[in-house]
Amino acid sequence: MIKYIEKFKLNNKTAVICGALGLLGKEVCVALAQAGAKVIALDINEEQGLLFQEECLKNNLILKYIHFDVTNLDSHKEFMETLNHEEGSIHVFVNTVYPCTEDWNHKLEGVKIDSWRKNIDMQMNSACLLTRDVAEIMKKNRISGSIINFGSIYGVVAPDFEVYTNTDLTCPAAYAAIKGGVINFSRYAASYYGKQGIRINCLCPGGIFNNQDKAFLSNYEKRTPLGRMGKPEEIAAAVLFLASEAASYITGTTFMIDGGWTCI
């Protein structure tokens, strides 16, 4: 009889999390470490990274923080090759990183071309290039690994701007373009590397609760079938599934975790 719970364990595997200090990144790190993985937490804030490392070690979780600037696209390939050599073969790679410019929230008519280009580079291009570089490392080392990118509901459907009524919030135009690009590139890469047993999926969260404006919360909850925003741990649990052998026949998917937002 198959022991199904064993399929979710990540013992003797190395999981690299990019954007590890974010709201979702931290939960993903904890989930994969609790499943037995050696977690490499990549982020730009060294002080916070070392504090997070210490916290995890106190809870008997194997996690190591390493400084990494995802916006330096020219460094990706060499950095990942060195990481793979020094920390052991990469079995799982999760990209939750979300860098953006200060004028990120401008409305469409106010977006400047330099801002558009920079955000496309930092978010979409970095995600696509990292996917390729990590997949090539897995291919070279004959690792049937799992790569998980982060898309969004707004990479699949258009924003419902009514949820921003009576708030200062909006959905940046570049965000929709970026997340749509990440989703379709993930499909492309899944097809390209499938013969090597490398699984590449794109996880698409809906809105995640983070003490948002009360008017926004009310609007969002009315629009969503489950009547609430998501929780970071609900995203992390889905990452654990896609990273594990429980999802061994799943690749190229756009995995929605949105409380039903995109079903209506």
Image: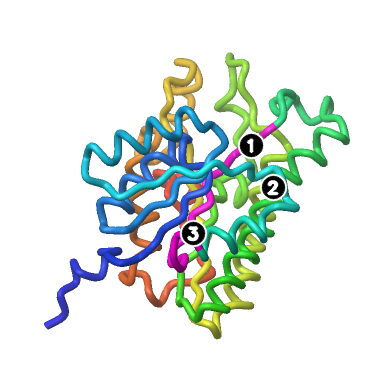
Q: Is residue 87 magenta?
A: yes
Q: Which of the labelled discs sits on residue 20, or is there none?
A: none
In what element is the residue under mark 1?
Answer: loop
Q: Is residue 47 above or below residue 63?
A: above
Q: Is residue 192 left or right of residue 12?
A: right
**Depth check: 90 or 254 in front?**
90
In what element is the residue under mark 2?
Answer: helix
Residue occupying image coordinates x 64% and y 36%: 99
Q: CA distance from mark 3 to mark 1?
A: 18 Å
Residue named by callout 2? 178
Residue named by callout 1? 99
Residue named by callout 3? 93
Q: CA distance from mark 2 to mark 1?
A: 12 Å
- Label 3 sits on what residue type? Phe
Q: Is residue 22 left or right of residue 134?
A: left
Q: Which residues are magenta?
A: 86-100
Residue occupying image coordinates x 71% and y 45%: 72
Q: CA distance from mark 3 to mark 2?
A: 19 Å
- Label 2 sits on what residue type? Ile
**Depth check: 252 or 81 in front?**
81
Label located before the other in sequence (3 or 1): 3
Q: Position of residue 200 (x, y in %)?
A: 52, 67
